[in-house]
Image (cartoon, helix red, strand yellow):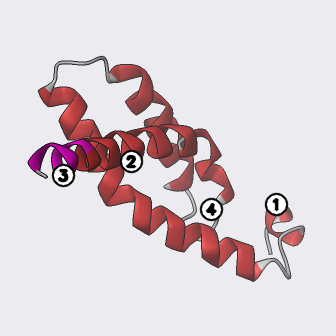
Amino acid sequence: MRVYEASEVGRRAPERLGVWLFWLLAPLAMAGAWLLRRRRQPLAILLRAAGHGHAHRAADLRLTRFRFAAEPSIVVLAAVAVDASWRRRRSAA
């Protein structure tokens, strides 16, 4: 067992919830990034933080705690997609 895994024994439920939320937000974050790119809005700062988190996560896919640096960017990008969808639905009504 790796040293940094020793403190994570017994915390499976929160870890699984985090994984499920990541898989829920990841497609929305990609859509948000695409929308910002299409609108020609600055995107580099959000992608840089997300890239940093995923570079560490690539070292060991079982541990979700290395994703912490990317999570704010993922949430912001997902919020962009949800907001665009919401505005589109409200304008169609």
x then y, percent, for residue 35: 20, 36
Kind of residue at badge 3? Arg
User: Looking at the rendered structure, which numbered label has been put on residue 89?
Assistant: 3
Report how far apart the C-alphas of labels 2 and 3 lie in the structure: 17 Å
Examine the image and state in which quarter residue 63 appears.
Answer: bottom right
Q: Nearer the viewer, mark 1 or mark 3?
A: 3
Report how far apart the C-alphas of labels 4 and 3 lie in the structure: 34 Å
Circle 3 packing at 10 Å, graded few (<14), some (14-19), many (20+), is few
Which one is earlier in the sequence, the residue at label 2 or at label 4?
A: 4
User: Looking at the rendered structure, which numbered label has been put on residue 4?
Assistant: 1
User: Looking at the rendered structure, which numbered label has been put on residue 78?
Assistant: 2
Which residue position is annotated with label 4? 64
Secondary structure at badge 2 equals helix
Do the CB atoms of the residues marked 2 and 4 lie less than 8 Å apart? no
Secondary structure at badge 1 equals helix
Kind of residue at badge 2? Ala
Nearest the eye: 6 or 88? 88
Secondary structure at badge 3 equals helix
Residue segment shown in magenta? 87-92
Which one is earlier in the sequence, the residue at label 1 or at label 3?
A: 1
Which one is earlier in the sequence, the residue at label 1 or at label 2?
A: 1
Q: Main secondary structure of the magenta part?
A: helix
Magenta span includes 91:
yes
Circle 2 packing at 10 Å, graded few (<14), some (14-19), many (20+), is many
Which one is earlier in the sequence, the residue at label 2 or at label 3?
A: 2
Secondary structure at badge 4 equals loop
Q: Residue at x 54, y 43 (%)?
A: 53
Report how far apart the C-alphas of labels 2 and 4 lie in the structure: 19 Å
